Image: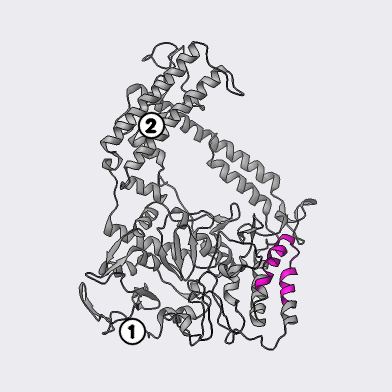
Amino acid sequence: DFDGDEMNLHMPQSYNTKAELENLCLVDKNVLSCLGNKPVMGIVQDSLVGVRKMTGDVYVDEYEGFNLLYRVVQQTKDKGYSADDDYVKDELYGDLKDDDMIYKSDNNMKCSGKDKNYDKTSNDKTIINNVINSGDGRMCMDYKIAVHRPAILRPVRLCTGRQIFSSTLPHINYRRGDVLIKNGILIKGSIDKKIVGTSQGSLVHVLALEGKCITTFFDSLQRVVCTFLLQSGFSMGIGDTIADERTMHIIVDKLRESKREVNKVIEESRRGEMKKAPGMNLRETFESRISQILNRVRDVSGGLAGDSLIKSNVRMMVVAGSKGSMINVSQMTACVGQQNVEGHRIAFSNQRTLPHFHKDDNRAESRGFVENSYLSGLRADEFFFHAMGGREGLIDTAVKTAETGYIQRRLIKSMENCQIVFDGSVRSEKDVISFKYGDDCFDGSRVERVSLNGREYSYLLFLNVCMEKYLNWSNDTINYNVNNNVNNNNINNNYNIKNNYNNNVNVNDNINNNYNNNVKDIYNTVNNNNINIKSTNHNNINSDNGYGTSTCNTIIKDIITFSNNKIFNRYLSSKQSLLQRLNYSALLHIRDEIKERYVRALVCIGEMVGTLASQSIGEPATQMTL
């Protein structure tokens, strides 16, 4: 909060300090958490609802679209924003030179402000050299943005919101649910909290694992989305919480029906006809049945209210995940529902809850059920019950802060000496806590989720993805993923690969369809198609370079057995049939990549895992309610 809080800035005073800050404290290096194997940073609030709106069925005037593109932050290779190889630049930019700026090239555009005269035969893709002020008075043109032509050309040239979003993405492939991103372009789907939030397998998670500059993505996306919201607008008012008249009549009928059900239960208990539920006495059974009825009517009425507010901006915030839930919509529109203190309905004090009611009155409204919505307004007794429930929340927050803080302090003190030692075990002074950290010695933030024989494991790579780089078939058939990933001089991004091979070439966009030889489906929820083909040393991808099958088998055996982790080796063994389809050169590359990823995923010697574990328990505990 900004009630007088201060911060201190520390400047690095030596090269050692500078190196430590760059390699340990950089934001990009701290996006993933070993606590839950997921990001700790994501897009929230305004930016989240804005990106949801932008990637829906939204069309932007071309002039406004180019204005949005100028908000994209610098994208350079040294920031990790493009792939390892130069083919990305070649594919995106073609033969355009630095002086082929869109505002300079006569064959593309002559414009001043909104006065546009276009050459209709221009390419689908052009380049903007983004001009930015370097801060010292000079203008620099040091980066380029690939601009696709507007999706709609007649009668008006319009860009889609998805095109604008794509301009913020690095070169990456990603699929989750309805969302498909191919070569850094959003093909379909709307972006919401599952994609750019902090969940496991989100786009943020994939970008961080692939070493892309995640801060550049965050900066670009937020700048573009905030500018988009300035243009399109997003507001919420009382009108967004009002359901239609027919829906309100149904909700009122449901509330009356639930009241009658509660009164029936009360009559049944007074006549002594109520039977005890398993594991409960009569009083507990009575309260349980009434609570079930009242909770059910709250959910039903909330669902009806939510369905009637399809085009409401409140609902859009809920769907995007930026703020609120369907319970909030229900309370604003339909009914606030049952108020609880210490997990039970409002208790009697001297045989009644308030002077408004008779003695021993167990009806829903007497015991804290608020049938009005915030929109219709609460009665005096309902307001008092609501204040009772709210007061408990405030006290609970104050108490649990001190409680959980002390719990965390004791945890840290008890485990502060636990660390990874030279042999991968966890030791505290002279005591051995664990012979192998986590049973596999992997860092929790460096692994990805895979499935083996129907069971899920966390391992460091998804082998099918690696195969995309190197897979090649025998003489007459070549099957591999051609997602702009081949960098031969005679293959261009704009042509179908079928035109480049004449002899029985089969192209299959989904490489998994080609693996039918008793190979279990190994899937990865984090990272499906985001490793690209390296062009170096692959001019002749089909040849064995003079090496025989036995040499290749030796390399395959090395890949499968180099680790002492049995489950990891079994996972690699299940892919042996795929490895056998690679030539010698590709096998060498994939072996080096697997070994490098394996070593990088191992936990560092000297890591203070005791403190790490304590904080991983303490931090979620502060979020819980007592």
Residue 605 vs residue 406: left or right? right
Q: Nearer the viewer, residue 226 or 504?
A: 504
Residue 18 forms part of the magenta stretch? no
Q: Residue 580, how many percent across, how many down?
A: 68, 75
Q: Nearer the viewer, residue 520 or 121?
A: 520
The disc, 2 or 1, on the residue closer to the chain's N-terminal end is 1
- Residue indicated by mark 2: 336
Q: In this view, does 564 lie above or below 496?
A: above
Residue 233 vs residue 523: left or right? left
Task: Name the amino acid, label 2.
Answer: Val
- Residue drawn at x 53%, y 86% is 503
Q: Is residue 529 above or below residue 589?
A: above
Label 2 SS:
loop
- Residue indicated by mark 1: 100
Determine the residue located farthest toward the bottom in the rendered image. Answer: 546
Task: Name the amino acid, label 1.
Answer: Asp
Range drawn in magenta: 554-578
Q: Which of 420 and 471 is in front in this view?
A: 471
How packed mark 2 is, by other alpha carbons closer than 10 Å (few <14, some 14-19, many 20 or more), is: many
The answer to whether residue 616 of the structure is visible from this angle is yes
Residue 570 forms part of the magenta stretch? yes
Residue 248 vs residue 4: left or right? left
- Residue drawn at x 52%, y 13% is 273
Q: Which of marks 2 and 1 is in front?
A: 2
- Residue drawn at x 42%, y 78% is 92
The quadrant in which residue 586 appears is bottom right
Q: Residue 380, how many percent across, how many down?
A: 33, 22
Q: Residue 144, how many percent across, how many down?
A: 39, 76
